[in-house]
Amino acid sequence: MSAKKAKVKATGYDIGCRVVMALAAISVPIAAYFADLIYYVIESPVFKLLAQYSGSENDDGSTYGYLGINMFVKKILPLIQESSENKTSLTNLLTNLSDIKTPLIVTTVFFALTIVIALAVFVSVIASNNTKIHFGISVAGLVSTIAMFISFRYVSAPIVSGTVNLGDFFESALMKTLLPFVASVSTFNLSTAWVIMLVIFIGLIVLSGANLIINAGEKTKANK
C-alpha cells in the first residue's frame, strides 16, 4: 500500500493570513472607486503673465488636480450621457481622441480586470485554504496592475506632448483653436488609487508566498 500524504491542518497563522488577505483584497475596489486615480497639471502662460502683472510672484500659472472614478460617475458620466444623445458630438470627440482611443480602452480593461482579480482573491481566501490558488491569483493581479500602468503611459504621452491637446475635448471650433495656445497639460499620471492597488497586490503575494513556504515546510515535516 502506498503511503498516504500527510494533511496539514489550518493553523492560527493560516486563518490570520487569510483574514488579512481578504481585507486587503476587498480594499482594492474600494480604493479604486474613492481614491484619486489620475493626477494632472495644466500650465498656462497667459495665467502666469496675469499673475506676474498682478504682483503674485509665486503663481506660475499652473493648475493641478485629481480625477477619480467617484468624480467620473458623479460629474463626467452625466456629460457623456448628454453627448451620447448627440451622436455627431460623440463621434467628433472620438475622432479627436483617436490617438489615445485604443490605449485608453486597454487601460480601462486592465483596470476592470484588476478589480475582478481582487474580488477573486477575496472569494478564494474565504472559500479555500489552498495557498497556491491565493498566490497565483495575487500574481495575476500584480501583472494586471503593472499592465494598466504601461498602457496608461500610451494615454498620457500624447496628452503631455500636445499631440492630443485640451482643445480636442471640445466641439467648438473656437475652443479647439484658442485653447492649445492658452493652456496645456504638463503632467498626466496615475495617482493614489493605482499606488494603493500595486502595494496591496505586492502584499498579497508576500503573504500568500510566505504561507505557501511555511505550509510546504510543515508538509515536509509531517511526511518524515
Image: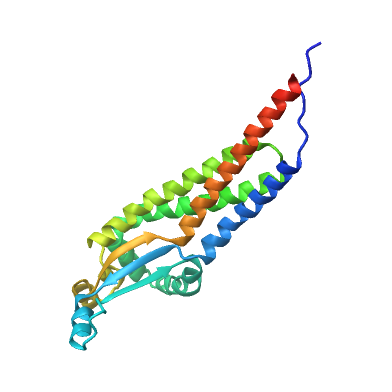
Q: Is residue 106 left or right of residue 215?
A: left
Q: Which residue lies furthest to the right in this view?
A: 1
In the rendered image, residue 196, in percent from the top left (x then y), is placed at: 50, 56
In the rendered image, residue 26, in percent from the top left (x then y), is placed at: 62, 55
> For this rendering, which residue is in front, 187 or 174?
187
Q: Is residue 159 left or right of residue 201?
A: left
- Which quarter of the figure is the N terminus placed in? top right
Q: Can residue 181 be seen from the camera position used here?
A: yes
Coloured how? rainbow
Quadrant in which residue 188 is drawn: bottom left
How many labels sit on residues?
0
Looking at the image, residue 152 lies above or below residue 170: above
Which residue occupies 75% across, 43% down?
12
Q: In this view, does 133 lie to the left or right of 157?
A: right
In the rendered image, residue 116, in percent from the top left (x then y), is placed at: 57, 51
Q: Can residue 163 be seen from the camera position used here?
A: no
